[in-house]
Amino acid sequence: HYGSHGAGYKHFLYQTLLARLKREGIVLAAVSRNDPEVALGPFKTGRMVLKEQDFVAIVASYNAKSVQVAALADQLNLGLDAFVFVDDNEVELTEMSLKLPQVRCERFIPRDDALPALLARVSAHFDGRTITAEDREKTEMYRRRLAGMVPSDAQGADLRAFLESLEMSLV
């Protein structure tokens, strides 16, 4: 669901915001706990606002997302405080917050009426910047930096150990 109508409308608006941020020099990256073919599938349709080339990287593996973000930060030579992680899964957000507290986290909306607040919060992370011509080329500059780099051999976090460390009780 990512079209401009129906169930995909909120994703369409969110992608529109990300496309604007990308034009303003914000570097987009995606991490997914999935097979690469599944993660890239929606881009292959050509019907989404965002295209595969709008991202500096789309990392899809079954490693923890915190591991994927840390490896990406290392490869791009960026501080973790430069990352904003948006996810709809509370477990993923909690895991990211505990493992990489420098990464700013935002929960993707569970309800459509929360969309304006989410868009405002995501935008606020990037307010007050002066946009230069160099900023508009950042994605391509970072993509060239990644070209030829050997993929990280980082191991995923032990999801079982993480969940056990939360000491939750299922009711």
Image (cartoon, grey):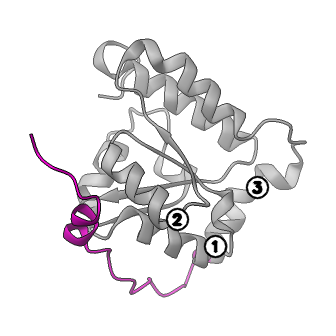
> Mark 3–mark 1 contact, CB under 8 Å?
no
For disc 1, the marked residue is 76
Instruction: Tell me the distance, in whole angstroms, between the alpha carbons under discs 2 and 3.
Output: 27 Å
Residue at image point 34% right, 22% down: 8
Give above or below for 9 relative to 135: above
Q: Are marks 2 and 3 in contact (CB under 8 Å)?
A: no
Residue 14, how many percent across, how many down?
50, 29
Image quarter of residue 171: top left
> Which residue position holds label 3?
137
Q: Residue furthest left?
A: 171
Q: Which residue is mark 2?
A: 100
Amino acid type of the residue that numbered disc 1 sits on in the rendered structure: Leu
- Is 113 drawn above or below residue 143 in the view shown? above
Q: Position of residue 150 (x, y in %)?
A: 48, 87
Cα distance between the residues tagged 1 and 2: 16 Å
Q: Nearer the viewer, residue 77 or 22?
A: 77
Task: Give residue 77's position: percent from left, percent from top.
Answer: 68, 76
Magenta stretch secondary structure, dominant: loop
Choose between 58 and 117: the one closer to the eye.
117
Quarter residue 151 falls in? bottom left
Quarter the N terminus occupies: top left
Vertically, is 4 above or below 157? Answer: above
Nearer the viewer's eye, disc 2 or disc 3? Answer: 2
Secondary structure of the residue carrying tag 3 is loop
